[in-house]
Amino acid sequence: MEIVHSGEVGGLRYVYSDRQSLGKIRSEENVLWSFAPHDISMVLALIDEQPIEVTAQGAAFVDPAIADVATVQLMFAGGVRADIRVSWLHFRKVQQIVALCERGTIVFEDSQPEWNRKLSIHEHVVELENGVPVPRRGPVRYIDAPYEEPLRNECVHFLQCIAEGKGPLTDGREGKAVLRVLQQASSAMAGHARSPEKVDE
């Protein structure tokens, strides 16, 4: 997130994420509510806006009442767009978030087994020459990230907030923002889109 917000590779244009695997198929919730909250949270943090439009599609293959695959599209007032793809029927684990910026692409691939290759910057750009788009490939840089357990860090941060009386990085407002997008996406999947302003409290 810091790399995107620093402007190191230019302004953010497009974000997409994949969270797919051949995992436990749930009966109490669909794949949107099971998998997508994590990615919605990351997308909102990267773009630092609430979407002005949310659309979504889903399909149920195992239980006709429960979606096994889903795709969510988000549009933001600043012009950035985002796609989120989730599935628990995928043949292998794919877990990544990609930020396409003006001067390159930032990739965090959590399913990458080599820790020092999880975060990378691909310095590829597409330029217009006489009205014709020309791709230009650049180097790929891998960013060192400390080897840490995310869940442990989350628990430590939670305890520090209690001990020091500080607000958490992700609070109730952030949770409500994620819930708002989930509700809009669910409505869109059900075929009756609702306005971003109408959110169940």
Image: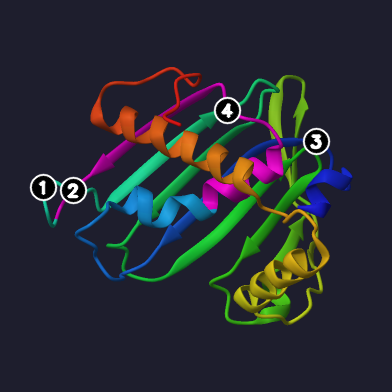
Q: Amino acid at mark 4?
A: Pro
> Under tag 3, what secondary structure?
loop
Q: x, y percentage for residue 157?
A: 73, 69
Q: CA distance from mark 2 to mark 4?
A: 26 Å
In the picture, the disc for residue 64 is: 1
Q: x, y percentage for residue 62?
A: 13, 57
Please state which of residues 32 and 59 is positioned toward the viewer in this rendering: 32
Q: Amino acid at mark 2?
A: Ala
Q: Which residue is mark 3?
A: 11
Q: Are marks 2 and 4 in contact (CB under 8 Å)?
A: no
Is 193 within the magenta? no
Q: Which residue is mark 4?
A: 51
Q: Amino acid at mark 3?
A: Gly
**As drawn, is 124 to the left or to the right of 95?**
right
Pointer 3 local density, CA inside 10 Å: few below 14, some 14–19, many at least 20? some
- 138 in relation to 177, above or below: below
> Under tag 2, what secondary structure?
loop
Q: Amino acid at mark 1?
A: Pro
Q: Are marks 3 and 2 in contact (CB under 8 Å)?
A: no
Task: Tell me which numbered mark, 2 or 4, is placed earlier along the sequence.
Answer: 4
**Residue sitting at x 72%, y 56%:** 168
Q: x, y percentage for residue 188?
A: 33, 28
- Which span is picked out in magenta? 39-61
Quadrant of the image occupied by residue 22: bottom left
Q: Are marks 2 and 1 in contact (CB under 8 Å)?
A: yes
Q: CA distance from mark 3 to mark 4?
A: 17 Å
In the picture, the disc for residue 60 is: 2
